[in-house]
């Protein structure tokens, strides 16, 4: 261990190396595979149909975006026109967030109180659909990144390189790094995320404090995390509404192994 504080900067290539996570241009292929798995998943037909419909809504929305982008071109002059939305889903997130939180159209009429409306320069969508598409996309990203499992490289990195006082800036949505650091008792959700300290369950926070599982390292997650929760109606409000959700909704357990012993309760 060392008293010197170091900062590590980790991008998508990190999760690719330690857990075969997708790079940006591969995420849509992973979503397609997740969609195929959903077709064969043994769950209630209602739950299955919801997720299948969410994929169809995503696919349809992208096709409409592509149509809007190529509207001004004479398609008869080309054998093929390809728009790279699926290779850059971050573009979709940016479009959605900009249009939901950007300039507003303000209406005035005597005796009326009319809520401003986002200035959405796309004829293919509206505010309600943009929120729905963002939710669908986040769900499929959750499905993909929850399944990632670290290999021997994450073991070497977390066990042989990271020290107690280190800080990590990471742009990945998954929990591969946190899971390994949690296992080694170097990191904890309690004070482990810079800027995100609220817990979805106050009881979880109290139990972690009682067990003195404070984090020794701190992680800056620049693009968010699958264990962060924001109520849908607050999706476009300040970051202070983000809370840490320790429950893993895919396997009816917890994101971090052994957490149920610390929290002294059964997995969800």
Image (cartoon, helix red, strand yellow):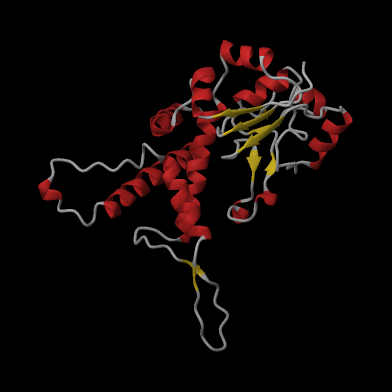
Visible residue check, residue 137: yes
Q: Quadrant of the C terminus?
A: top right
Q: Nearer the viewer, residue 193 or 169?
A: 169
User: Where in the figure is residue 118, as x and y percent of width and height?
Assistant: 48, 65
Q: Nearer the viewer, residue 219 or 200?
A: 219
Q: Residue at x 46, y 54 (%)?
A: 130
User: Where in the figure is residue 119, as x and y percent of width and height?
Assistant: 45, 66
Q: Quadrant of the N terminus?
A: top right
Q: Nearer the viewer, residue 253 or 202?
A: 202
Q: Give the image quarter of residue 30.
A: top left
Q: Residue at x 11, y 49 (%)?
A: 76
Q: Residue at x 64, y 47 (%)?
A: 230
Q: Nearer the viewer, residue 189 or 48?
A: 189
Q: Is residue 24 left or right of residue 260?
A: left
Visible residue check, residue 257: no
Q: Is residue 218 left or right of residue 91?
A: right
Q: Give the image quarter of residue 248.
A: top right
- From the viewer's perspective, is residue 119 above or below residue 21? below
User: Where in the figure is residue 71, as x and y percent of width and height?
Assistant: 23, 56
Q: Is residue 39 left or right of residue 183?
A: left
User: Where in the figure is residue 41, as x and y percent of width and height?
Assistant: 48, 27
Q: Give the image quarter of residue 264.
A: top right
């Amino acid at each position: 261990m060392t008293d010197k504080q170091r900062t590590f900067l980790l991008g998508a290539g990190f999760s690719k190396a330690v857990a075969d996570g997708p790079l940006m241009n591969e995420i849509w292929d992973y979503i397609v595979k997740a969609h195929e798995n959903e077709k064969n998943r043994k769950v209630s037909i209602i739950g299955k149909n919801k997720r299948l419909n969410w994929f169809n809504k995503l696919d349809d929305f992208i096709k409409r975006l592509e149509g809007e982008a190529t509207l001004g071109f004479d398609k008869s002059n080309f054998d093929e026109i390809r728009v790279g939305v699926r290779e850059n889903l971050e573009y979709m997130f940016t479009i959605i967030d900009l249009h939901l939180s950007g300039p507003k159209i303000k209406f005035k009429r005597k005796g009326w109180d009319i809520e401003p409306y986002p200035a959405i320069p796309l004829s293919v969508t509206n505010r309600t659909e943009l929120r729905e598409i963002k939710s669908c996309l986040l769900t499929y990203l959750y499905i993909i990144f929850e399944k990632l499992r670290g290999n021997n490289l994450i073991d070497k990195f977390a066990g042989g390189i990271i020290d107690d006082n280190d800080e990590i800036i990471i742009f990945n949505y998954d929990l591969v790094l946190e899971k390994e650091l949690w296992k080694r008792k170097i990191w904890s959700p309690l004070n482990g995320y810079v800027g995100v300290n609220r817990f979805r369950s106050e009881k979880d926070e109290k139990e972690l404090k009682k067990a003195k599982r404070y984090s020794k390292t701190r992680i800056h997650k620049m693009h968010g995390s699958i264990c962060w929760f924001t109520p849908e109606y607050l999706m476009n409000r300040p970051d202070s509404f983000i809370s840490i959700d320790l429950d893993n909704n895919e396997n009816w357990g917890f994101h971090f192994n052994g957490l149920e012993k610390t929290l002294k309760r059964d997995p969800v």
